[in-house]
Image: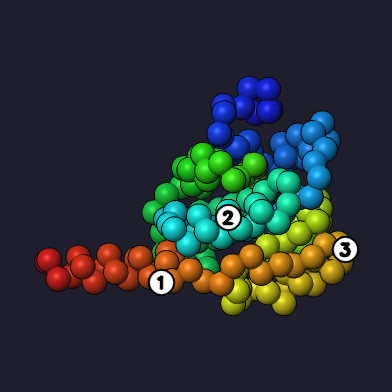
Amino acid sequence: MNSSNKPTGTANRGDLNAFLEFRKNHPAGTLVLVGGCFDILHYGHWVFLRRAKALGDRLVVMLEPDAFIRRRKHRQPFHRQTERAVKLANWKMVDWVISMPLLASDADYHTFVEKIHPQIIAVTAGDRFYAKKQKIASALGARLVVATPPVGSWSTTAIIHRLKKNHSRHT
């Protein structure tokens, strides 16, 4: 999808090649990159993405695949990657959603980010991959910026625990 047929208020979305083609034809100022699963969108996500967008001109979200959620989170995703991409693309602060494949190694992740070549990589305080992201940012001449602290008790994991707790009370 290119910007000429992009619905108002909806970000472009696609794979890395689609993004690279778009970027070639639509150069931007400061590109901010974030990544994550964004499985159950919540207020903490909204605050983080809004603050990340404020750091630059374009906000690109690297969206982890379903297999990543199964492998790293040890659970099934609530929403498929395609559904998560559509939801993210409809938040006005998001300019592009890249649906990632399952990457096999840190080196593959580095190469993926290198192709995007952001000027800023935004994270939440306490990001467990902070050191790895700092290495990538340094190698690219980009800045790693903590866009926000964790926002209250908003996290997908906390929401899942609350749902399970409430469900067990009613069964």
Which residue is at 65% across, 42% downward? 96
Which residue is at 48% across, 62% downward? 44
Q: Earlier in the sequence, mark 2 or mark 3?
A: 2
Which residue is at 81% across, 53% downward? 117
Name the quarter where the C terminus is drawn.
bottom left
Foreground of the two, 67 or 47 = 47
Q: Helix, strand or loop at disc 2?
A: helix
Residue corresponding to mark 3: 141
Neighbour tally class for label 1: few under 14, some 14-19, many 20 plus, Cα within 10 Å: few
Q: Quadrant of residue 143?
A: bottom right
Q: Are marks 2 and 1 in contact (CB under 8 Å)?
A: no
Residue corresponding to mark 1: 153
Q: Earlier in the sequence, mark 1 or mark 3?
A: 3
Which residue is at 59% across, 67% downward? 148
* Amino acid on which the number 3 mark rests in the picture: Gly
Mark whose residue sits in front, 2 or 3 = 2
Residue corresponding to mark 2: 49
Count of residue discs? 3
